Amino acid sequence: MNVAIANASSDPVRIPTRLEAFTRALRALRVLSRDPNQLDHILEFFFAVNSRSMSKNLGPIIDSPGWQSLLRDRPRIDDEHIDFAALEALPEGTLGRAYATFLKENGITPAPFKTAPNVCDDRLSYVMLRFRQTHDLWHVVTGFRTDVDGEVMLQAFTFAQTRSPASFLIALFGFMRFALDPRAFSRVRAAYELGKKLPPLGPTRWEEMFERPLAEVRARIGAEPGVLPVPSAAA
């Protein structure tokens, strides 16, 4: 399953300037304001907002044995490297089965996350790809759903974990959208505090734990029994 990173073309692009990033993010937001399910524009927004910050802080991001190991092996979680039918056949309660069920029930396919961002630093390209390909696994282990409320809480959790500017903006705008709900602040804050509490999930090798019980995986990442999931609006 281990493959070398491959950029989308032989001519990697540079990190956008602040003005270019702002323009690209604004263009993506205009589309998303009309249709928030446009995945390509969601990825464009995250790239435009996060790429400069991640490039600047790449050293600290990957300065851990976990990330160094991932960058050495470059594992991927997509339909070329993971047998999703085999995950569906795993016993009930395992991480892999829960992940496959999550994707199926929400109509999600890993196909759009197959291509790495085409940037000039292949380490940054892989780190960004890894975060994209593991986003739905973060949903599974945290218990945050894919509705708007759940996505906002996951982004608050992600900001606490990674300091991602895009995650901060989504969590902030999401909180403002639900500001009239007296429980909104407590939910977003709980998600943020949970992100601070747990160790960084970025360098986790989820694919090596697919056959393990989800409860065991949650324990291994430092989640105490009863901590996850954080209730969302409908709970």
Image: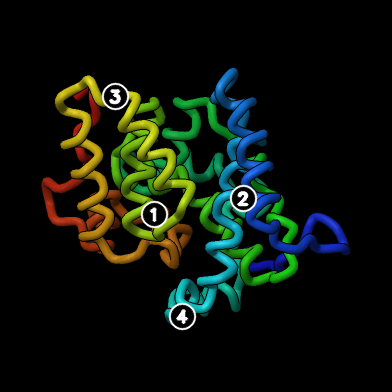
- Give the alpha-carbon distance from disc 1 to disc 4, as whole Å: 28 Å
Q: Which mark is residue 211?
A: 1
Residue 89: tell me if it is visible: no
Q: Which mark is residue 78?
A: none
**Location of mark 3 (residue):** 178
**Location of mark 4 (residue):** 63
Which circle's residue, 3 or 4, is located before the other in the chain? Answer: 4
- Give the alpha-carbon distance from disc 2 to disc 3, as whole Å: 26 Å
Q: Amino acid at mark 3?
A: Phe
Which circle's residue, 1 or 4, is located before the other in the chain? Answer: 4
Q: Amino acid at mark 4?
A: Asp
Foreground mark, 1 or 4? Answer: 4
Q: Residues within 10 Å of mark 2 (few under 14, many from 20)?
A: many
**Location of mark 2 (residue):** 47
Q: Nearer the viewer, residue 78 or 171?
A: 171
Give how far across and how far down residue 100 sits, in percent.
47, 38
32 lies above or below 52? above
Which circle's residue, 1 or 2, is located before the other in the chain? Answer: 2
Q: Residues within 10 Å of mark 3 (few under 14, many from 20)?
A: some
Quadrant hosting residue 18: bottom right
Q: Amino acid at mark 2?
A: Phe
- Give the alpha-carbon distance from disc 1 to disc 3, as whole Å: 38 Å
